[in-house]
């Protein structure tokens, strides 16, 4: 017969495993009725608490932050999440333990690293490991996902609202007077939900204005392919130069791709924004670098996401629900000069933050 787990108790009581763990450890502000139900269920199932957890006491000191980025350019984007989390945790009296997920660090090694440190909570920036996270949750260590929308139905998460961000960015182009707008993205199998949501927000803005979006205005590039840049250049030429009906603006998946498109447009002899405007969500690149093109973006508010992540955790430790909660934050338009009214004129009415 298998040994009963926290998850078994949580499923019967219809609460989270973290709530069960808090009650059995004598922590948290859980109602007397729910505490009694959890303790009674644990006794009926014959649940025995792990001695290592008893030794840990009624509170934890260490909080684990897991960070892993597959693409090198994303380290700049990811780092502020970690630094802000570290600052907040230290100010709250906790000791942050940052683990950079390396390929050679397997699930068991990572789990043992977290358990050996007696970390009471795990924040994961972008990175998701279903086997590891389910094991942590089952053993009473709550996991909060930061900026990964692929598993919002499974884990408590703080995300950016990619649909609304793409919608607001497209509205900015429409307010400038653009009506022939192209859309560009690159293959990203790791975050399919973000790719889908940004395109949906873009299309929603066009649909509200009854603006058609012909299929030929959609650009999709596999950047790992040897001929990716040639394909991109040919597509841009078709959409802007070799056509009687050129697009006047491009909405691009993020500013990493935006920088690639920017270079391709310059190589074609086109000017930004005089010939074509560029707008991208994200702010994944480092605009302190003087050589990076100045792109207008929908900026993700990383400090706000971290602040909300902490509040979400505090809420989770006392909640009596087994359903994950998801909070989304709004993007802010940052105008760096890569968008302008099209040559035939426009009506620039948006209020934006100029930098």
Image (cartoon, grey):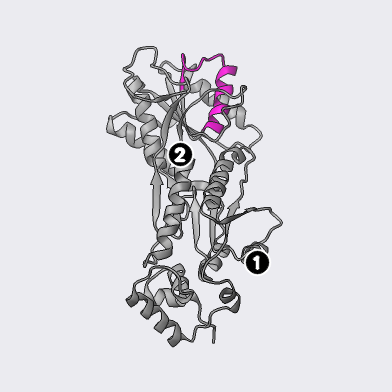
User: Residue placed farthest to the top in the image?
Assistant: 344
- Residue 241: x %, y % from top left: 49, 16
Can you say whether 137 is above or below 45 in the image?
A: above
Does the magenta-highlighted stretch encompass residue 263? Answer: yes
Q: Is residue 126 left or right of residue 327?
A: right
* Element class at badge 1: helix
Q: Which mark is residue 301?
A: 2
- Residue 335: x %, y % from top left: 44, 24
Q: Is residue 178 left or right of residue 223?
A: left
* Element class at badge 2: loop
The residue drawn where x is 35% and y is 75% is 34
Within 10 Å of disc 2 (Cα), the crowding (few <14, some 14-19, many 20+) is some
In depth, the one of 318 and 132 nearer the eye is: 318
In depth, the one of 49 and 250 nearer the eye is: 49
The residue tagged 1 is 116
Range shown magenta: 255-277
In depth, the one of 29 and 111 nearer the eye is: 29
Can you say whether 351 is above or below 144 in the image?
A: above
Q: Is residue 129 left or right of residue 278?
A: right
Q: Quadrant of residue 173?
A: top left
Can you say whether 73 is above or below 279 in the image?
A: below
Position of the N terminus, as image quadrant, is bottom right
Within 10 Å of disc 1 (Cα), the crowding (few <14, some 14-19, many 20+) is few
Question: Which is in the foreground here, disc 2 or disc 1?
Answer: 1
The residue drawn where x is 50% and y is 25% is 295
């Amino acid at each position: 017969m298998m040994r009963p787990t926290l998850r078994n108790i949580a499923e019967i009581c219809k609460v989270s495993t973290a709530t069960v763990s808090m009650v059995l450890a004598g922590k948290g502000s859980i109602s007397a009725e729910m505490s009694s139900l959890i303790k009674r269920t644990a006794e009926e199932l014959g649940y025995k608490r792990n001695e290592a957890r008893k030794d840990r006491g009624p509170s934890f000191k260490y909080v684990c932050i897991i960070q892993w980025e597959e693409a090198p350019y994303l380290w700049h984007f990811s780092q502020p999440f970690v630094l802000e989390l570290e600052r907040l945790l230290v100010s709250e009296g906790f000791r942050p333990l940052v683990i950079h997920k390396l390929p050679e660090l397997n699930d068991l090694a990572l789990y043992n690293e977290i358990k050996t440190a007696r970390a009471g909570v795990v924040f994961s920036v972008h990175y998701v490991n279903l086997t590891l996270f389910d094991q942590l949750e089952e053993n009473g260590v709550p996991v909060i996902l930061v900026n990964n929308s692929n598993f919002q139905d499974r884990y408590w998460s703080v995300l950016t609202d990619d649909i609304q961000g793409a919608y607001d960015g497209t509205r900015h182009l429409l307010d400038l007077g653009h009506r022939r707008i192209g859309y560009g993205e690159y293959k990203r199998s790791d975050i399919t939900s973000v790719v889908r949501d940004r395109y949906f927000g873009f299309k929603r803005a066009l649909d509200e204005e009854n603006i058609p979006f012909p299929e030929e205005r959609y650009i999709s590039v596999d950047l790992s392919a040897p001929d990716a840049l040639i394909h991109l250049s040919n597509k841009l030429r078709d959409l802007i130069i070799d056509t009687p009906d050129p697009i006047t603006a491009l909405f691009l998946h993020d500013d990493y791709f935006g920088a690639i498109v920017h270079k391709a447009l310059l190589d074609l002899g086109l000017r930004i924004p005089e010939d074509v405007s560029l707008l991208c969500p994200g702010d994944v690149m480092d605009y302190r670098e003087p050589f990076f093109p100045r792109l207008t973006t929908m900026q993700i508010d990383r400090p706000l996401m971290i602040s909300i992540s902490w509040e979400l955790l505090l809420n989770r430790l006392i909640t009596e629900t087994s359903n994950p909660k998801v909070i989304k934050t709004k993007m802010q338009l940052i105008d760096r000069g890569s968008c302008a009214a099209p040559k035939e004129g426009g009506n620039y009415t948006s209020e934006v933050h100029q930098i």
